[in-house]
Amino acid sequence: MYEINIENIEAFVYVIHCGSFNKAADALYLSQPSVTARIKSLEQELDCKLFDRQGKQVQITEDGKRFLPYAQQLLLIYQKGKLHINQKKSLPNEFRIGCTVSVSNYIIPDLLPRLKQRFPNTHYKIVTGTTDEIMNKVLGKDVDIGFVRNVNHPSLQSSKFYEDPIRLYAYDGHPFLTTGNLSIEAIAEQPLVFFECGSLDWLRIHRIFEHLDLPPNIQIQTDNSEMAKKLVIQKAGIGFLPDLCAKQEIHDGKLYQIRVPETEGISLQTNLISHHGEHLPFVEAITEIGKQLEAAKLLLSAN
């Protein structure tokens, strides 16, 4: 009767993730024969063949495919348990957060006070950049976690943190505020301040104008949501903005939402990324806070 060895399971998962025994050995800081020995030991433990080896090529078997999700789950549970046992030791003096500029402006101020309540002895450092820059900083361990657009990378775990609807906004006194059933044609004729963040979601905004004979009347285009918002307030035009960006100005009566059925369901998704199994106390706390912020947003929109 064999007992399952967590190191053998780790080797199995890494061979699949890295694509070869040599690359798995490099990632685990082991020799290639050590990884091979661990795989052979696991195959004996399970009484099955996990890989077909043809020269340097490695192909996972059907038994290997069936075992993979259980192996990943076992490894993740082990890593979680290990971190929770040593939680006090593992909590850093400084926690580094990378995020896009919009997240730093509209999410971090609500998130950070709640996070400090849970980890009062930790200091926080916030670094801003584009989604690609922040993802590279997380990969290089220059920051501990990142808030980015909806992206995936095999070396990182990525989960939805927040979804922010994109709506059309107008300034106080604009004629659209008293006009019902607006057509896309009427919106396209208006001077538009167009905030463009490079996300695929913004392509969906562009597509609502595709069927028109003439392009939309985009007077100003910017990649800065704060600038776009202030230009709309200054009556330079109307514009599509994320809800979080306009929250305070709606409250102050400076901006007003205009319902456009064609844009219902279009939103910007912010994902939380980190290395697999790392910083779990923070990741779990931030995920929970994200759910609280989403619930508060829904409650506010219902009122």
Image (cartoon, rainbow, N blue to C red):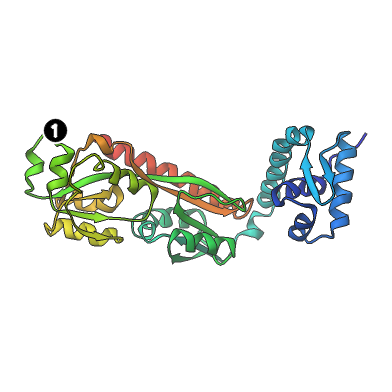
Residue 71 in percent (x, y) is at: 74, 40
Q: Which is more toward the observer, 289 or 47?
A: 47
State the quadrant of the C terminus: top left
Q: Which is more toward the observer, 28 or 123?
A: 28
Q: Report the side of 203 relative to 40 (left or right).
A: left
Q: Mark 1 points at which residue?
A: 181
Residue 74 in percent (x, y) is at: 72, 40
Count of residue discs: 1
Which amino acid, by three-letter code, is at mark 1? Asn
Q: Report the side of 162 relative to 244 (left or right).
A: right
Quick check: 299 above or below 284? above
Tag 1, which secondary structure? loop
Residue positioned most to the front? 213
Q: Report the side of 177 relative to 9 (left or right).
A: left
Residue 141 in percent (x, y) is at: 59, 64
Quick check: 27 above or below 203? below
Q: Report the side of 125 relative to 281 (left or right).
A: left
Please tell me which residue is depicted at 63% across the width and 57% down the height of the picture: 88
Residue 13 in percent (x, y) is at: 74, 46
State the quadrant of the N terminus: top right
Residue positioned most to the right? 1
Q: Quadrant of residue 299?
A: top left
Packing grade of label 1 (10 A; few <14, some 14-19, many >=20) is few
Please tell me which residue is depicted at 86% across the width and 48% down the height of the picture: 38
Please tell me which residue is depicted at 79% across the width and 32% down the height of the picture: 63
